[in-house]
Amino acid sequence: MLPHILLWAAAALYTTWSDYGGTADSMQYSALKQIDKSNVQRLELAWSYPVPGPSNRFGASPLIAGGMIYLRGADDALVALDAASGKKIWTHPVEGNPTDRGLNYWESKNHSDRRLIFAANSYLQEINANTGVTINTFGNDGRVDLREGLGRDPKTIRNIQSGTPGRVFENMIILGSAPGEGYGSARGDIRAYDVLSGKLIWAFHTIPQPGEFGYETWPKDAWKYGGGTNTWGEISIDEKRGIAYFPLGSPTYDFYGADRIGKNLYGDCLLALDARTGKRLWHFQLVHHDLWDYDPTAAPKLLTVEHDGKPVDIVAEPTKFGFVYVFNRVTGEPLWPIEERPVPKSDVPGEESWPTQPFPTKPPPFARQKFTVDDINPYVDAQEKERLRNILLHARNEGLFTPPAMRDTIDMPGELGGNNWGGAAADPETGMLFVRSANAPTLHKLSLNPPRRRPVGGTPEQQGHALFSERCEGCHGPDRKGVVAPRDLGLEKFKAIVSGGQGEMPSFSDLTPQDLNELAAYIDNPAAGALPEQPRRAGAPPTPPPPAGQVRYYTPYGTLNANNGLPAIGPPWSTLTAYDLNEGTIRWQVPLGIVPELAAKGITNTGSYHPTRNGVVATAGELVFVGTWSDRTVRAFDRDTGKVLWEKELESNPEGIPAVYEAGGRQYIVFAARTGRVFDNIGTDSMAWKPGKPEAQGYYVFALPR
């Protein structure tokens, strides 16, 4: 337990929710304790706000300030409601796709100027938080083009905005980006803009240029063509010290790096910058030369713990691959030793995987990091077990950091597993960290995957089918899992998402308007898109390989599932883990959620299945709140034991980070819920598929009875 003075300081903070994740340090913690372990079972729905309609990316965490709650509403509009009653105050229509995980809020010192900050279609914008009116004095007539200043022709960058909001610090808005994860993506520079004028204050090059630290970790001039290395996840700020912490993602392409031989700083780094100047203070690379899409995305957690008998300010970073890395947040020194250990070597032509990776000695991992035949899902029949066994025995499967190969390769926990954005909360009173995790093994196989030739004289549906096979089938599969038809989504919105990207989906900025129309035609009418056979001319030589240095390998994303739609590995498929970071130990770990069809048979220790991004929130009432997808349920756990104290099934799927606030002397907790899917690893025939009602999409606000 921490010293009394630190407990008092923690209690004095964390009583508002005007920042994404609650506070600038991203703790996802509330010091409000009207709702506690003794009364949480009495929680009831206080009010709700429906946002009907199809949505692939609904789940924004609300902000609460000045007695208003700010939400994402129907047709992607921004909405302000009375925080106590849910009564609508204003609506602001948005042109394009706004930041889908939340907003930023800024106010002047005298509280007279209050602004909401967001991006839509890669334009940074601001509106008056009192009225919802656009602030036209910001940027160029109210907008700042985020595609400018990245060393590329802005016309070639269709999308750069992240789905995650940035961080406000003093009079700046500090932003990451999401330039896409394919070949040719833009680089992910970190930038800070003036809140009032929109002018660029500083930029940090995440792919170093000549003379900058880390330039030698890339091939010569990689900054001119390299991409990614971006913070598409969450940023944290130590406001007292003026230090900003960024989890930086992998360089592109995610799974093959022959054009970026080297360690590739600042890919997969936890990076600390001076928030006022953008100057590098320290960094630690969590994955060298990433070939697994293992970019860290969860917010770095800024805690104070007792270490060797003294209080130490730390930063803790959970990862997709199951480790938590803990550092002194000022110096970057690891709290416990981190060892460089040998890992398997790539055998793919041109690739040079890094020979070692950094393994923390403490705390222990929260996710499983290997998948053997002894781990196969027990809830499948004998024939399916044998199929999965054959896959495992014939695949390259050497545990954590097995590199992608030109044959089947197993990755565990996989790029859709482990921890992700919103998936961790911290308790400043105890030094505890709560981590949501998914165990989702993936099966990869690299190939040259040349584009399929389009049929000469083919119909728009056939042309669209060929394009879908080339660009989309690797992730969505031949049956188009997870794709919302343009006739349901709206043609213009469909085209904007495909060309601009959204969230984890990369942008396809080179597609022409005709390409987009043909793709839409096929998805709306797949039966009309049957492709003719394309026989190869007898005696024709094989297609010559691309010139030296131009070879590009590809592999689709995807979990390795059993034929019932559940993971090939046995449960638990999701967990909630409580760490004591004073000691570097796991206090408890419990399955998170259920699969209803198995629970009906008495099998309840499985955890839910679906790697959505359900956020975690801890409170001073000694509670941890989180939602789960495959059972559409929100829960409160006992902070000290992991016991479920309250649960409520919704009619739609909980998504994003809950928000905790007080209005009119009453404490509320609000969850977003949506009907669509983020990833396509679950089909509608899956045992874990439990779709929500479109009319039930929206926000659910709970409180104790009056």
Image (cartoon, rainbow, N blue to C red):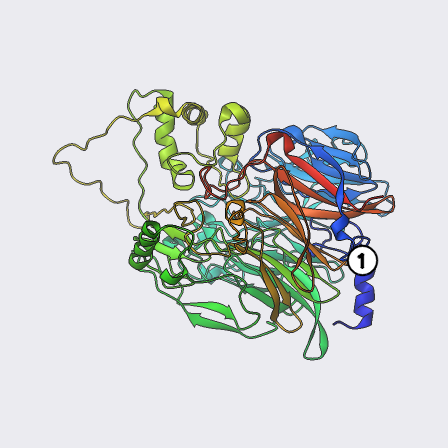
Which picture quadrant has residue 405?
bottom left
Q: Amino acid at mark 1?
A: Leu
Pick the residue in front: 315 or 214: 315
Q: Position of residue 113 (x, y in %)?
A: 82, 40
Where residue 128 appears, as percent x and y from the top left, is 78, 35
Q: Quadrant of the C terminus?
A: top right
Residue 475 in view: yes
Residue at 52% in and 33% down: 497
The residue identified by callout 1 is 13
Seen in the picture, residue 496 relative to 208 is either above or below; the reply is: above
Place residue 575 in its image quadrant: bottom right
Q: Is residue 67 left or right of residue 700?
A: right
Q: Quadrant of the N terminus?
A: bottom right
Q: Residue at x 52, y 63 (%)?
A: 285
Which percent across, then down, holds residue 506?
Answer: 48, 41
Q: Residue reaching furthest front?
A: 601
Q: How many marks?
A: 1
Viewer can see residue 275: no
Identify the element where label 1 is drawn: loop
